[in-house]
Image (cartoon, rainbow, N blue to C red):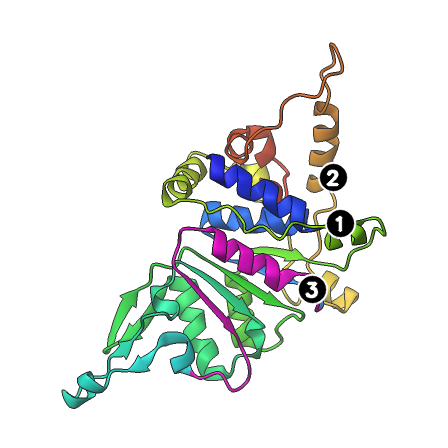
Amino acid sequence: MQQFEELKDYLHSNFVELDHAIRALLLGLTAKAHVFLLGPPGTAKSHLAEVICDSLELKSFRFLFTDETKHKDIFGIQSIQALKEDKDVLITEGKLPVAEVAYLDEIWKANASVVNMLLWALRDGKFTNGGQAVKMPLVFAIACSNEIPEDSTRRAIYDRLLIREEVKDIEMGENFRKVLERSDAAPPKVPMKEIEELWKSAEAVKVTDNGCQPRYPPLGHPKIAQEGTGRCSRSETGGRDLRKRRRRDTTDPDNGAVPPRRSFGEELQDPRNHQNARPDEA
């Protein structure tokens, strides 16, 4: 999976202090799970999602939601030819129903009618066309916002975004220069063959009972209510234990040498990474 490894290196080199968000997105691709990035404006959420879409040999759909977004903007316009035959058929080319990866920016700003259709699309991978339920080829979606949804329908969509990561402003002063000096080169393109290899490697991962603990409390949980921000909280035990173990593993006890860096696929196969681990480190 050479191109995939090159993409991972490219992302870590060009997106400063976004390691966890990068791993969350790559995990979403590997596990075919939807990803939600939460963070204030200017933290490169959108740019990161755009680069992911550009670098995959998958058909993509990208959209910035507003309260004026219409159903046709997402799912396609009605076919005039079909209307002449008294049929309600949508022309879906270039829209969400034919996409394999989707980037949905400011998703919570969508109006109620669009949200209801998005819920079905993200939950079951289906939409209605010509009076029939049609299966969508959507592999995973990347949703971004700077807020947490409040109403019940949008919360239902939030529950379908299984991998969630909070993105913050740059905290270390020396990293500001890295942002200015990052490469303008295009990201490497990951071919479909390598993407399918990723999916096969994910199918081989065995999840133990210890790895089934939720990373985030559900919406309405006292911890979220107490914090008042609704931000995604990181694991206080599993992630720390994993980081400690990895620090112990960084050197060879015999000669102190640093072992060669493992590929993303090899990390997936390591059973140590699936016990008390955060989802973006599994």
Query: Residue 34: which disc?
Result: none
Residue 33 or 275: which is nearer the viewer?
33
Q: Start and end of the magenta stretch?
A: 41-70
Residue 74 occupies quadrant: bottom left
- Image side of residue 58 versus residue 236, left or right: left
Q: Could you give the CA–CA distance between mark 3 and mark 2, rounded to whole angstroms?
A: 22 Å
In the picture shown, does residue 126 fall above or below 277? below
Sequence-wise, the earlier of marks 3 and 2 is 3
Q: CA distance from mark 3 to mark 1?
A: 20 Å
Q: In the image, residue 135 lies at what x, y percent?
A: 30, 63
Instruction: Determine which of the numbered discs, if any, sits on residue 39 in the image.
Output: 3
| Rendered image: mark on residue 178 | 1
List x then y, in percent, for residue 277.
63, 39
Viewport quadrant of the C terminus: top right
Mark before the other along the chain sequence, 1 or 2: 1
Task: Specify the farthest residue to the left.
Answer: 85
The secondary structure type at the circle numbered 2 is helix
Q: Amino acid at mark 2?
A: Arg
Asked whether 67 falls inside the magenta stretch, the response is: yes
Of residues 69 and 54, the one drawn nearer to the viewer in this rendering: 54
